Image (cartoon, rainbow, N blue to C red):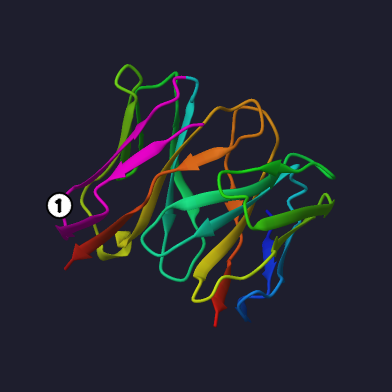
Amino acid sequence: GEQVEQLPSILRVQEGSSASINCSYEDSASNYFPWYKQEPGENPKLIIDIRSNMERKQIQELIVLLDKKAKRFSLHITDTQPGDSAMYFCAASETGGNNKLTFGQGTVLSVIP
Amino acid sequence: GGIITQTPKFLIGQEGQKLTLKCQQNFNHDTMYWYRQDSGKGLRLIYYSITENDLQKGDLSEGYDASREKKSSFSLTVTSAQKNEMAVFLCASSIWGGAVAEQFFGPGTRLTVL
């Protein structure tokens, strides 16, 4: 089955700087790559996703990049704020079927004021 | 919009005990999932169900059973709780097929085994 590696596991940045999280996957059939944010004590929520027909997608301060050849994708949070502090998960899936997601191990992001 | 409800919110069990976790969704989603989340680790898929009466094993199915009683509900059973086990079990649901695979998560059940 699919395997997704996520790094780093812990990330600390100063408020206003950028934060980057990197993921890699193994199955070339994967074509959908969502990112979930989980705040302490809360359930994971989808914040941005990208499909394999795109290389870049931006929603406000969130940017995702996808390199299909290298089987890598990444999340970049520009101008980080304390409210961005949370656990972030990347995932990969092949859509059109059961939508089974394989998640990365998670990154704990702390934004220091 | 919709909501996913998980019961109980906290579950304390004894070693060897059989424990059942319940999940209900009103999104009218076809597919439901059970994940286990351990501290410092990602979400690992235990079981999923594409539609009512369907059951598929995930990567972590050993030690668990599941049951999709009807479209809106999906139960997970820990067949024999392991001593000192602590984890959060998350239920999720999504549409089946299509181009959008967003999964919506419930609030979780926190399991502690004494």
In the image, residue B104 sits, relative to residue A34, either above or below, namely below
In the image, residue B68 sits, relative to residue B30, either above or below, namely below
Residue range corresponding to the magenta coloring? A1-28
Q: Amino acid at mark 1?
A: Ser
Residue A59 appears in the picture as rendered: no
Q: Chain of mark 1?
A: A
Crowding at dot 1, Cα within 10 Å, few <14 / some 14-19 / many 20+, comes out as few
In the image, residue A69 sits, relative to residue B65, either above or below, namely above
Residue appearing at x 62%, y 70% in the figure: B81
Find residue A59 and report its horizontal and vertical position in percent.
Answer: 37, 40
Find residue B31 and report its horizontal and vertical position in percent.
Answer: 71, 43
Q: Which one is nearer the viewer's eye here, A113 or A13?
A: A13
- Look at the image and say whether residue A70 sits in the magenta stretch: no
Quadrant of the drawing holding the C terminus of chain A: bottom left
Residue that label 1 marks = A17
Residue B66 location, quadrant? bottom right
B83 relative position to A10: left or right = right
Q: Which one is nearer the viewer's eye here, B111 or B64?
A: B64
